[in-house]
Image: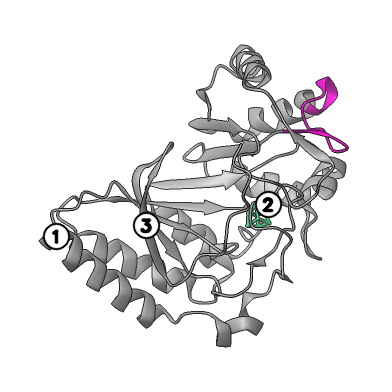
Amino acid sequence: MSEERLNLQKGIIYGPVKSRRLGYSLGINISPEEIKLCSLNCAYCQYSWTGLLTKDGESFRKILPTADEVKKSLTSFAKKANKEKQHIDFLTFSGNGEPTLHPEFSRIVDYVLKISEVFESKPKIACLSNSTTLDKKEIFESLQKIDEPIMKLDAGNEKTFRLLNRPASKIDYEGIVANLVRFNGNLTIQTLFVEGEIDNTKEFELESYVQKLKLIKPKLIQIYSLDRPPAYKRIEKVSQKKLNQIKQFLIRELNLNVVVY
Ligand code: SF4
């Protein structure tokens, strides 16, 4: 595990980084530059605690890049990448918080879809989302348009969700699960496991988690643990050996694809 906490990303476009999951991934940060804007305050977040905890991105429009700024930055990167023959596998919405909180998220997705055609390496589009905004029709529909919606689900029950992910008000755990079911399996579920004062690896936790996955039926489940110091100090990294045991348990119970990172 790296000893260093991750710094917030500067600017709209960052990378490309060689990602274990997505190959050469170019990050698109549509969150603020100076502070994390998120609807969750995960105990394990590599960016430390959430500065702006909210489900309402509209109130923070002034500190967010506009859709036109995103379009301009990405277009100019695409031209440079083509000139330098740089290969990009994925354009990935991630960065300083939850991308779908951006009030112009749908418009930005449409721009990115168009600009992806300009890249000679024809990258796919991914979004790392915490799954809390799917009750908004336009967000749900935009996530259907991209290649890889990678959606967070760390807990099989409301109690552990609240302890581990510490949501903003008006976020309902069962509502999240119901919305993930609406993807009809066309999604990846991403789950981070921790031990210590909060522990989502216990038998009863895994059993409730499996029940939710039976409803969601994702095409892929990615499981992993801490890679950097967490915001909350009383949680610990789960060993690779234990992650592999969880993987085997999930495969036995679900007969779905599971990958450990
Ligand atoms: S959802 Fe992601 S960015 Fe937000 S607090 Fe959790 S880990 Fe951090």
Of the pair 90 and 219, the residue shown nearer to us: 90
Depicted 15 relative to depicted 195: above or below? below
Q: Residue at x 63, y 44 (%)?
A: 3
Identify the residue position indicated by label 2 in the image: 45
Kindly report the distance in space between the C-alpha atoms of the residues bearing marks 3 and 1. 15 Å
- Asked if residue 196 is among those painted magenta in the image, a careful observer would answer yes
Q: Quadrant of ligand 1?
A: bottom right
In the image, residue 254 lies in the stretch drawn in magenta? no
Sequence-wise, the earlier of marks 1 and 2 is 2
Q: Which part of the image, by quadrant, shows the N terminus? A: top right
Does any atom of ligand 1 lie closer than 8 Å to the CB of label 2?
Answer: yes
Q: CA distance from mark 1 to mark 2?
A: 34 Å
Query: According to the image, label 3 marks what residue?
Result: 15
Amino acid of disc 1: Asn
Above or below 123: residue 32:
below
* Residue type (three-letter) at the residue carrying disc 3: Gly
Q: Residue at x 70, y 40 (%)?
A: 154
Expressed as whole percent of the image width and height from the top left, the position of residue 110 reads 35, 67
Give the mark nearest the N terminus, 3 or 1: 3
Q: Could you tell me the amino acid type at mark 2?
A: Cys
Circle 1 packing at 10 Å, graded few (<14), some (14-19), many (20+), is some
**Horizontal arrangement in the rendering, residue 114 relative to residue 130 (left or right):** left
10 Å crowding of disc 2: few (<14), some (14-19), many (20+)? many
Q: Residue 30 at what x, y percent from top left?
A: 48, 70
State the extent of the magenta-drawn residues as a range: 194-205
Mark linked to residue 82: 1
Q: Is mark 3 within 8 Å of ligand 1?
A: no
| Residue at the extreme front | 3
